[in-house]
Image (tube, rainbow, N blue to C red):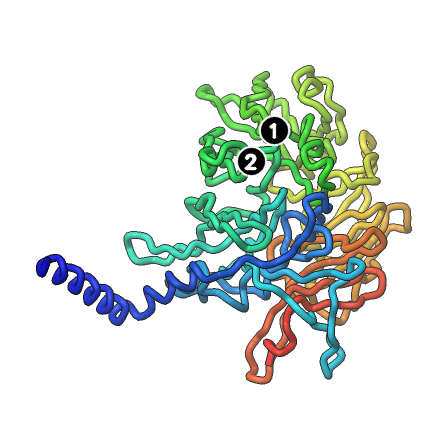
């Protein structure tokens, strides 16, 4: 009995020493366990708006990242779960009639009246991406582990899942290195299973993230290890009764190209609902896939390396296999769709046009007609942000612009979507265009302020594109 007591006392002393020497190990464990789930929240039947950006709305709740964190400034263990309780974490705020509730500061700027912490971990960085499916929020975060040489691997991206009230936080996957925002997404199959699809180097994986059997969570399905292009379904908004329908038909596939053992180009597709290969096409031509949205795949075909790639669109796999896809470009115009060129794809109300960015200029071309016209004038275009109806919103030289199809071609005097004198801070790689209600469109971007100490304080800001009113998603007190 005396021996057992000594062992117990020794263990307790050892734990106390570990706490003292470890400088907060026990505190971290207690804090992680003490995070309490939030009360209330969106309904299961509520619509989701803005998947894939820095803000995402479900019903009357807007989930957002607070500010922006440079990966190079993150220290070891600084990004452990429950260590981040303010700047850089994920918050939510309740909307009233589709609008955030704000209070005005002395300088006239508007800040949130209230915000609730959802995820105490860094999610506000250059690879920010928030998604909601069902009762789950999916998000990205910089990796906080060291490699064997002691280097902190913040260039790697971690993917996580958490309930909408902040409970049941789980890690899904970590990339092997850098990954661009265009090379990953979360999709929901017609079977209700949510998968993370990611191109990690030359490999493409599908990782089960929600739905199905609980024992299947985290299962990694290798799709290919030699991809040279990939097109994944891009869906930002849905209603609860069509969450599965939006990823049906051609939108239930991941398209990619690779070279076979003989060096021939192969166009392939993998269906994430059946979790099986759905297309494998080799016919001596050179394929490259560009984008997949609005039930339309945009891809290119070249007869061989000496020929210019020409653009095609298809709404189903049978059309691709049968070689009867609709050609949308002819001759040298097809160069707009080379894999290295950023292409916006087809707009909701612009199905007769292709909008593309070529050498920092925006061009529009009528399908099947060689009538390419310049839309952006002399501006150096960074990116097309969104297409709403016939309006095209784009970033150029640090500012947000709008031009419209059907109006006189913009020759250097495009309409400013917001105050042209206020440069937009485009720190977050994918700026999200989101609708807080059916009548208003908002643009979300990272805006920098200088506080009283001379330090930079950056927050996600929503701009009402109709009237230019800005909503800063943060606490006014935090910038002082």
The crowd level at tag 1 (other Cα within 10 Å; few <14, some 14-19, many 20+) is few
Furthest residue toward front: 1
Q: Which mark is residue 219?
A: none
Secondary structure of residue under mark 1: loop
Q: CA distance from mark 2 to mark 1?
A: 8 Å
- To which quarter of the image does residue 197 belong? top right
Which residue is located at x 80 percent, y 40 percent? 348
Query: To which residue does mark 2 refer?
Result: 211
Marks counted in the figure total 2
382 w.r.t. 203: above or below: below
Q: Nearer the viewer, residue 366 or 187?
A: 187
- Residue 247, compared with residue 66, is above or below; it is above
On the image, which quarter does residue 286 sit in? top right
Residue 377 in sight from this viewpoint: no
- Can the viewer see residue 241 in this picture? yes
Q: Is residue 404 left or right of residue 175?
A: right
Identity of the residue drawn at 32% across and 53% down: 147
The reply to whether callout 2 and callout 1 are in contact (CB within 8 Å) is yes
Identify which residue is drawn at 79% across, 62% down. Answer: 464
Q: Residue at x 82, y 56 (%)?
A: 440
User: Is 32 left, or right, of 437 in this rendering?
Assistant: left
Q: Looking at the picture, how far across and down is residue 22, in whole percent?
A: 28, 67
Front residue of 105/241: it is: 241
The numbered disc on residue 191 is: 1
- Mark 2 or 1 closer to N-term? 1
Q: Measuring from the top left, give residue 265's x and y in whole percent.
A: 54, 24
- The answer to whether 186 is drawn above or below residue 25 in the figure is above
Is the N terminus in the top left, top right, bottom left or bottom right quadrant?
bottom left
SS under mark 2: loop
Graded by Cα atoms within 10 Å as few (under 14), some (14 to 19) or many (20 or more), the crowding at tag 2 reads some
């Amino acid at each position: 009995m005396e021996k057992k007591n000594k062992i117990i006392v020794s263990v307790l002393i050892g734990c106390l020493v570990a706490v003292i020497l470890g400088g907060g190990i026990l505190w971290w464990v207690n804090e992680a366990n003490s995070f309490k789930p939030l009360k209330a929240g969106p309904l299961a039947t509520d619509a989701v708006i803005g998947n894939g950006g820095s803000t995402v709305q479900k019903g009357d709740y807007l989930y957002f990242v607070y500010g922006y964190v440079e990966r190079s400034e993150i220290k070891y263990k600084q990004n452990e779960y429950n260590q981040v309780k303010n700047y850089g974490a994920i918050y939510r705020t309740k909307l009233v009639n589709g609008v955030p509730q704000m209070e005005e500061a002395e300088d006239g700027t508007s800040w949130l009246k209230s915000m609730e912490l959802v995820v105490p971990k860094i999610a506000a960085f250059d690879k920010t991406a928030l998604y909601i499916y069902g009762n789950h929020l999916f998000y990205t975060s910089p990796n906080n582990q060291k490699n064997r040489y002691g280097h902190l691997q913040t260039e790697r991206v971690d993917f996580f899942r958490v309930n909408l009230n902040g409970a049941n936080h789980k890690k899904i996957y970590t990339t092997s290195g850098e990954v661009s925002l265009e090379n990953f997404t979360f999709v929901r199959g017609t079977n209700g299973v949510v998968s993370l699809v990611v191109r990690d180097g030359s490999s493409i994986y599908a990782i089960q993230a929600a739905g199905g059997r609980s024992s299947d969570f985290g299962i990694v399905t290798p799709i290919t290890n030699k991809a040279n292009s990939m097109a994944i379904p891009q869906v930002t908004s849905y209603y609860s009764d069509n969450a599965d329908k939006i990823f049906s038909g051609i939108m239930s596939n991941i398209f990619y190209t690779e070279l076979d053992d003989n060096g021939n180009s192969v166009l392939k597709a993998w269906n994430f609902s059946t979790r099986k290969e759905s297309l494998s096409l080799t016919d001596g031509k050179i394929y490259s896939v560009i984008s997949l949205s609005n039930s339309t795949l945009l891809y290119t075909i070249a007869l061989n390396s000496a020929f210019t790639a020409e653009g095609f669109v298809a709404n189903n796999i049978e059309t691709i296999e049968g070689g009867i896809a609709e050609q949308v470009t002819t001759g040298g115009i097809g160069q707009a769709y080379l894999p290295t060129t950023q292409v916006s794809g087809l707009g909701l109300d612009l199905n007769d046009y292709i909008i593309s960015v070529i050498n920092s200029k925006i061009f529009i071309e009528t399908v099947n007609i060689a009538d390419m016209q310049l839309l952006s004038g002399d501006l150096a275009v960074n990116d097309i942000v969104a297409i709403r109806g016939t309006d095209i919103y784009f970033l150029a030289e640090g500012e947000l612009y709008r031009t419209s199809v059907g109006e006189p071609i913009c020759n250097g005097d495009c309409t400013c979507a917001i105050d042209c004198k206020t440069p937009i801070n485009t720190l977050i790689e994918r700026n999200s265009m989101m609708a807080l209600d059916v009548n208003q469109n908002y643009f979300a971007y990272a805006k920098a302020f200088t506080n009283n100490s001379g330090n930079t304080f950056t927050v996600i800001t929503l701009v009402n594109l109709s009237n230019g009113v800005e909503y800063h998603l943060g606490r006014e007190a935090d910038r002082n």
